Image: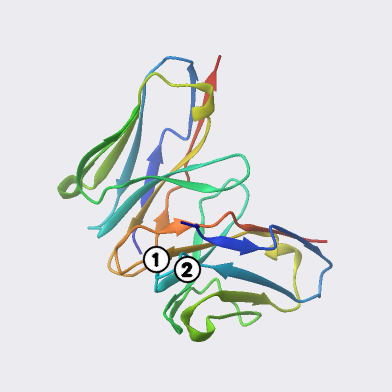
């Protein structure tokens, strides 16, 4: 099946810093989503981005489908951005395959 | 507009007992998915439905697990003869169509003692 690798596994930032999270995948995809998992376990949809670039406030994402990677940018980070960020892809089947996530900690 | 809801949010049970979880998808979403997440890992796919038809099951779904979606509305996931290894967060998601974004519920956290 399709493989998803996220980097870095852990990231510690000071409030106000910018960061880039990366997601590499092993095959062509029909769906790519970025999620933020809050401390209670809820997966919050950030972006649905099988290709192209999108922005939502301080967050933006770019997927280069031909090169099989996606990037999530967080600018001017805040303590509330802390948590686990997951990339998930849907290949030829209907299932989402998740990476192992990036644990982000933003310190005040 | 209500999102995906799951019930119960937490379940503690003893090994060998049966448990059942419920998921209510976003209305008009005809696809419903179940995933399982253990500590420190990303969610893993278990099964999915299109309307009332169960179209795919993961090899993770042993014969102790059964899922239904009667009438293509809510879904239930039952685990029979629970084992300690079943302790996990069980997540439900729904989507409008194939390849559309999936939206997740808050999950049911199962602890098997």
Q: What is the chain letter for disc 1?
A: A
Q: In the displayed structure, would residue B66 be above or below residue B26?
A: below
Write the residue at 39% across / 60% down. Answer: A96
Q: Residue B97's spot in the image, x, y percent? A: 31, 69
| Residue that badge 1 annotates | A95
Q: Which residue is mark 2?
A: B33
Asked if the residue under mark 2 is in contact with the one under mark 1, i.e. CB atoms within 8 Å, the reply is: yes
Residue at horizontal 72 percent and vertical 79 percent from the top = B80
Q: Does B29 sit above or below residue B72?
A: above
Residue lying furthest front: B1
Determine whether the residue tagged by mark 1 lies in a helix, strand or loop. loop
- Against A81, residue A33 (above or below) is below
Where is residue A59? Give x, y as percent: 34, 31
Dot label at residue B3: none
Labels 1, 2: one chain: no
> Chain for mark 2?
B
Where in the figure is residue B19, as x and y percent of width and height?
73, 73
Image height of B67 relative to B26, above or below: below
Residue located at (37% from left, 50% from top) = A4
Colouring used for the render: rainbow
Is residue B65 rendered to the left or right of residue B25? right
For the residue pair A77 and A56, the one nearer the viewer reads as A56
Query: For mark 1, does the 10 Å Cα neighbourhood hold few (<14), some (14 to 19), or many (20 or more) residues?
Result: many
Side (left or right) of B53 relative to A105:
left
Q: In which quadrant of the rendered image does the N terminus of chain A lie? A: bottom left
């Amino acid at each position: 099946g399709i493989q998803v690798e996220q980097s870095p596994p852990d990231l510690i930032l000071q409030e106000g810093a910018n960061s880039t999270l990366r997601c590499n995948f092993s095959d062509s995809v029909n769906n790519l989503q970025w999620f933020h998992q809050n401390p209670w376990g809820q997966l919050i949809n950030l972006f649905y981005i099988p290709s192209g670039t999108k922005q939502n406030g301080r967050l933006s994402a770019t997927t280069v489908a031909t090169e099989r990677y996606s990037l999530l940018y967080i600018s001017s980070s805040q303590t509330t951005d802390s948590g686990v960020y997951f990339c998930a892809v849907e290949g030829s089947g209907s299932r989402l395959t998740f990476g192992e996530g990036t644990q982000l900690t933003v310190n005040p | 507009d209500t999102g995906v809801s799951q019930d119960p949010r937490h379940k503690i049970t003893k090994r060998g007992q049966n448990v059942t979880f419920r998921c209510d998808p976003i209305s008009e979403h005809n696809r419903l998915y179940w995933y399982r997440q253990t500590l420190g890992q990303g969610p893993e796919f278990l099964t999915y439905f299109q309307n009332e038809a169960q179209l795919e099951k993961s090899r993770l779904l042993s014969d102790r697990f059964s899922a239904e979606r009667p009438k293509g509305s809510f879904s239930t996931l039952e685990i029979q003869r629970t084992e300690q290894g079943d302790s996990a967060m069980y997540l439900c998601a729904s989507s409008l169509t194939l390849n559309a974004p999936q939206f997740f519920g808050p999950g049911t956290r199962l602890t098997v003692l």
